[in-house]
Image (spheres, grey):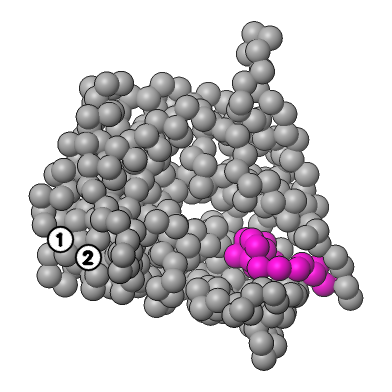
Amino acid sequence: MPAKIRNKVLTYEGCNYLRYRLLLSTLSGRPVQITDIRIKDDNPGLREYEVSFIRLLDKITNGSRIELNETGTNLYYSPGLLNGGDLEHDCSLQRGIGYYLEGIMILAPFCKKAVEVKLRGITNNTIDPSVDRIKAIGVPILKRFLLGDNEVVLTIKKRGAAPLGGGEIHFKCPASRNLRTIQLHDSGMVKRIRGTACSIRVSPAIANRIIESAKGVLLKFLPDVYIYADHCRGAASGKSPGFGISLSAETTNEVFFGGEACSPHMTTGSLPCVPEDLGKEAAMKLIDEIYRNGCVDSPFQPMTAMFMALGKKDVSKVVTGPLTPSMIQFLRDLRDFFGIVFKIEPLKEEDEVLDQVVLTCVGVGYTNISRRIL
């Protein structure tokens, strides 16, 4: 539903894109009200993972005001100042750590203090980007926008599969006063593929089977393929069995594409998951992402658009693959909160219209007023 303004408060209906709307509210300082959250559902209101994300926002900010009605179907959020610092958070087991980490990465550069956060929960699942994909692809995107030689570190301490989790990651990001504008026109040619196949509380041979299957597909296109087998033992293996693979392709222009697959949570009567099928699935997803041929990996399109909009008052231009549904809605929400409109046009080469999209915008000149000037 499009936004409505009631008493100078942006009002949305429904639970879709709740996370991005809360992030936009936090950065813009504009309060937001979200009504009719799953009112027709048998279990109405916010889910546990959404409440957990709101608690994380409350930890990273100072002075936020959150009001939730008894049924959880009506949320009012008035953001406080972004504080940052050392944080610890136990993520809901309904979603992966990637769901929470993406939000932290968007907010971290604008905090008063450098962010050092420990997140515990599920590192690999079938819904959210795995922590491996965020480390290989999301962190380089964040580094592109930060000024100076800023060190962004993501460390995977423990792995945890669904449904019981038990994983832990440490993320460190410095505060930045401004963001730089970027120009990404050409993704370049893929020069190497790297990846990590993890086996959690299962036989180490499963990771090797996944690797052989993925290599069987990728070596037809490129000789430089290396996939690391990460077999977790003891305390570092979480509380539930599972296995998965995350692949990343690097191009000659330092653009990264990703593809991943993870074993689903097995229930009574469900079909078994074959490691060979998982390796082939991840490889095909990576090839599909390369075929889309933008300069940004699909799951990180909204994060890139956010940083482009909050950059200096200069023109940023990025070529992406076909826009994802979440990116399309995010651009609409970005216009509601910041009044920024992107110029969206198809990419043309020699009288041929390609599937790629050219995104152009002028940044709002967002300045981190909380950060101390040394």
Q: Is residue 137 visible?
A: yes
* Residue 202, numbered circle: 1
Mark 1: amino acid: Val
Number of numbered discs on residues: 2
Instruction: State which tag comes first along the sequence, 1 or 2.
Output: 1
**Dot 2 corresponds to which residue?**
241
In the figure, residue 266 lies in which quadrant? bottom left
Q: Residue at x 40, y 73 (%)?
A: 93
- In the rendered structure, the answer to whether residue 368 lies left or right of residue 122 reads right
Is 343 above or below relative to 336? above
Residue lying furthest top: 350
Quadrant that contains the N terminus: bottom right
User: As rendered, which of 8 and 239 lies closer to the eye?
Assistant: 239
* Residue 284, numbered circle: none
Q: Residue at x 77, y 67 (%)?
A: 12
Is 317 above or below relative to 95? above
